[in-house]
Image (cartoon, rainbow, N blue to C red):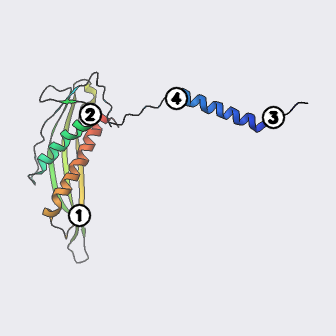
Amino acid sequence: MKIKTPYYIFCLAACIIVTLATIVSCKVSYDFNGSSIDYTKTKTIQIADFPIRSSYVWGQMGPIFNNELKDKFANHTRLIQVRRNGDLKIEGEITQYQLRNKAVTSEGSSAMAELSMTVNVRFTNNVNHSEDFEKQFIASRSYESSQSLGSVQPELVTEMCKDICDQIFNATVANW
């Protein structure tokens, strides 16, 4: 007497075999440092201090930005920071720091204000000059006008500097 195996068992076995073959043949690679740098060719980075060229200035903004940018590359890459002749070179200036009204109340007074910052960046890749660029990066933050600028400025500037440094990092070495 011959026992007939149901058709669904053959289908299930075929699906399992195909799934296992796919898993074994595929390779997924993730790099969690956020950069796509070929460290065999690119070993150093030169990051110049960005001067403030804006007509409106908050004195602590320059050091906050410059430190954040250098820390970003130090913490997320294995590049050695050098003073000159880097494989990668980042330079530029803070070109605009601006405060403006964003929303007005029914009485005509300001309800919300917006602080914005613009940074001009010149990037040179001495290993691959086709990646060179000059570009502006912008960040802004809003706050309620009932708060004084002096009380919110340190936090907002720090947030904007982090945002712009993330944008610069992504544009230069993350290739996203």
The disc labelled 3 sits on which kind of residue? Thr
* Vertical placement of residue 44 versus 140, above or below: above
Q: From the image, tell me which residue sits under label 2.
A: 77
Q: From the image, tell me which residue sits under label 3.
A: 5
Residue 63, position in %: x, y? 12, 46
Per the model, the C-alpha gap separating discs 1 and 3 is 71 Å
Tag 1 near tag 4, CB within 8 Å: no
Per the model, the C-alpha gap separating discs 1 and 4 is 49 Å
The disc labelled 4 sits on which kind of residue? Cys
Tag 1 near tag 2, CB within 8 Å: no
* Image quadrant in which you'd find residue 46: top left
Front residue of 36/9: it is: 9
Q: From the image, tell me which residue sits under label 1.
A: 143
Q: From the image, tell me which residue sits under label 4.
A: 26
The residue depicted at 24 percent of the width and 51 percent of the height is 139
Instruction: Name which of mark 1 and mark 2 comes first in the sequence.
Output: 2
Tag 1 near tag 3, CB within 8 Å: no
Instruction: Name which of mark 4 and mark 3 comes first in the sequence.
Output: 3
Instruction: Name which of mark 1 and mark 3 comes first in the sequence.
Output: 3
Residue 82, position in %: x, y? 14, 29
Marks 3, 2: nearer the viewer: 3
Number of on-image labels: 4
**Element type at mark 3:** loop
Per the model, the C-alpha gap separating discs 4 and 3 is 32 Å
The disc labelled 2 sits on which kind of residue? Thr
**Element type at mark 4:** loop
Instruction: Name which of mark 3 and mark 2 comes first in the sequence.
Output: 3
Tag 4 near tag 3, CB within 8 Å: no
Per the model, the C-alpha gap separating discs 1 and 2 is 34 Å
* Image quadrant in which you'd find residue 167: top left
Per the model, the C-alpha gap separating discs 3 and 2 is 58 Å
Q: Quadrant of the C terminus?
A: top left
